[in-house]
Image (cartoon, helix red, strand yellow):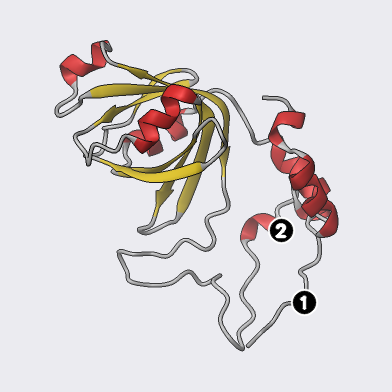
């Protein structure tokens, strides 16, 4: 996935309005098409993820996909697979994939150290996939070919295990701290100044 596909005119207009184009370009360097060992461990340890799809008219749909850790597998350098389990029979996500292969997956950890990983790519629904024979409860298998794998700033993710909101979540009368990555040498020179916002 090259830059024109990753950032379109709407992205660029907002980046220019908020002075973040240089930062966005720097973050583009984190995008990859193959999974790292750390990606694999995070994905295969996840008990859930969020799946975004769209139909041929561009009407979006977002769904929660869950299972036992390991229900999503990294099956190749740039491929992952997950099962379709019995549901409500609407087939909104998989029906969209049948007519529009573009998908986006969000893996997120909300206990302990927050973490997010995004996977954008193309998907196909496989009815006779070899993984069916070894995946308890699967009706079909969905395979995703990654086009853009990239981390996402987790600063607003709450710690549900501790029952605590993120320290970065805006609150009236409190200036939230800057995330550590903004001070890293690889980003500090392109981080735009914080905009003045309503403080309550």
Task: List the residue tagged with mark 2.
Answer: 183
- Using the rendered view, name the quadrant where residue 143 is placed: top left
Q: Residue furthest front?
A: 57
Please rate how many residues cluster around mark 1, counting C-alpha atoms within 10 Å: few if below 14, some from 14 to 19, many from 20: few
Question: Could you tell me which residue is drawn at 46 percent across and 34 percent down?
Answer: 39
Return the x and y of residue 25 as percentages of the image width and height: 78, 41
Is 82 left or right of 145, judged from the image as shown?
left
Return the x and y of residue 51 as percentages of the image width and height: 42, 40
- Quadrant position of the C terminus in the picture: bottom right
Count of all numbered marks drawn on residues in the image: 2
Task: List the residue tagged with mark 1.
Answer: 196
Q: Earlier in the sequence, mark 1 or mark 2?
A: 2
Return the x and y of residue 129 as percentages of the image width and height: 28, 12
Establish if 67 lies above or below 178. Answer: above
- Using the rendered view, name the quadrant where residue 183 is placed: bottom right
- Quadrant position of the N terminus in the picture: top right
């Amino acid at each position: 996935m090259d830059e024109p596909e990753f950032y379109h005119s709407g992205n660029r207009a907002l980046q220019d309005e908020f002075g973040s184009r240089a930062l966005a370009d720097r973050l583009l360097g984190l995008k990859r098409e193959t999974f790292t060992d750390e990606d694999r461990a995070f994905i295969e340890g996840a008990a859930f993820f969020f799946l975004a799809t769209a139909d041929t008219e561009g009407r979006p749909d977002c769904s929660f996909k869950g299972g036992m850790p390991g229900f999503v597998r990294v099956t190749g350098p740039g491929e992952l697979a997950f099962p379709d389990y019995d549901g409500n029979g609407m087939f909104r996500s998989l029906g969209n994939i049948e007519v529009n292969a573009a998908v986006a997956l969000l893996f997120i950890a909300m206990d302990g150290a927050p973490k997010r990983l995004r996977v954008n790519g193309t998907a196909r629904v496989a009815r006779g996939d070899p993984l069916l024979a070894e995946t308890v409860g699967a009706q079909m298998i969905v395979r995703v070919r990654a086009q853009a794998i990239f981390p996402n700033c987790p600063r607003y993710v709450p710690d549900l295990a501790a029952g605590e909101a993120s320290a970065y979540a805006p609150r009236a009368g409190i200036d939230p701290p800057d995330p550590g990555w903004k001070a890293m040498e690889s980003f500090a020179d392109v981080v735009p100044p914080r905009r003045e916002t309503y403080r309550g």
